[in-house]
Image (tube, rainbow, N blue to C red):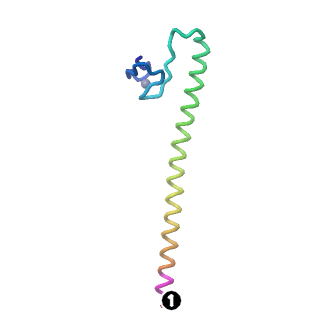
Amino acid sequence: MQCPRCKTENGTRTICSKCGYYMYRPDVANRAQMTKGQQAIEDTKLVGKKVGKVFKYVWMIVTLIVMSAWLVAGMVWLVSTLGGQ
Ligand SMILES: [Zn+2]
């Protein structure tokens, strides 16, 4: 099945391997419900992607702060050790 969003051929897959688009089959009886569910899945995915991106940046910043704090602490320790002699 071809993805209606990015035109990637996904074979028998129902979720696009490239963009994650949910491709429901047209032979499914409760089509309206599937469309609603599909929308909900899409929304959850989008929010999850955004949160994941933000979390990545926050994690990077926290790691940088912690690393620089350790570096400064190490420098201070080194200076005080050398200065004490
Ligand atoms: Zn796609």
Q: Main secondary structure of the magenta part?
A: helix
| Furthest residue in direction front, as rendered | 12
The quarter of the image holding the N terminus is top left
- Residue 24 vertical position relative to residue 18 in the rendered view, above or below: above
* Ligand 1 positioned in quadrant: top left
Please give the name of the residue rendered at 51% of the width and 55% of the height, measured from the top-left corner: 61
- The segment highlighted magenta reads 79-84
Q: Is residue 15 left or right of residue 32?
A: left
In the rendered image, residue 20, in percent from the top left (x then y), is placed at 47, 28
**How many discs mark residues in the rendered view?**
1
Which of 11 and 5 lies nearest the eye of the viewer? 11
Please give the name of the residue rendered at 56% of the width and 21% of the height, measured from the top-left corner: 38
Q: Indicate the quadrant where residue 19 lies.
A: top left
In the rendered image, residue 63, in percent from the top left (x then y), is placed at 51, 58
- Residue 58 vertical position relative to residue 41 in the rendered view, above or below: below
- Residue 76 vertical position relative to residue 84 in the rendered view, above or below: above
Q: Secondary structure at mark 1?
A: helix
Which of 10 and 55 lies nearest the eye of the viewer? 10
Instruction: Answer whether residue 83 is magenta in the image.
Output: yes
Instruction: Answer whether residue 48 is magenta in the image.
Output: no
Q: Confirm or reject: label 1 Cβ below 8 Å from ligand 1.
A: no
| Furthest residue in direction bottom, as rendered | 85
In the rendered image, residue 21, in percent from the top left (x then y), is placed at 48, 24
> Dot 1: within a 10 Å radius of its alpha carbon, few (fewer than 14), some, or many (20 or more) residues?
few
In the rendered image, residue 4, in percent from the top left (x then y), is placed at 44, 18
- Give the amino acid type for the residue marked by disc 1 in the picture: Gly
Please give the name of the residue rendered at 52% of the width and 73% of the height, measured from the top-left corner: 73
Please give the name of the residue rendered at 57% of the width and 22% of the height, measured from the top-left corner: 39
For disc 1, the marked residue is 84
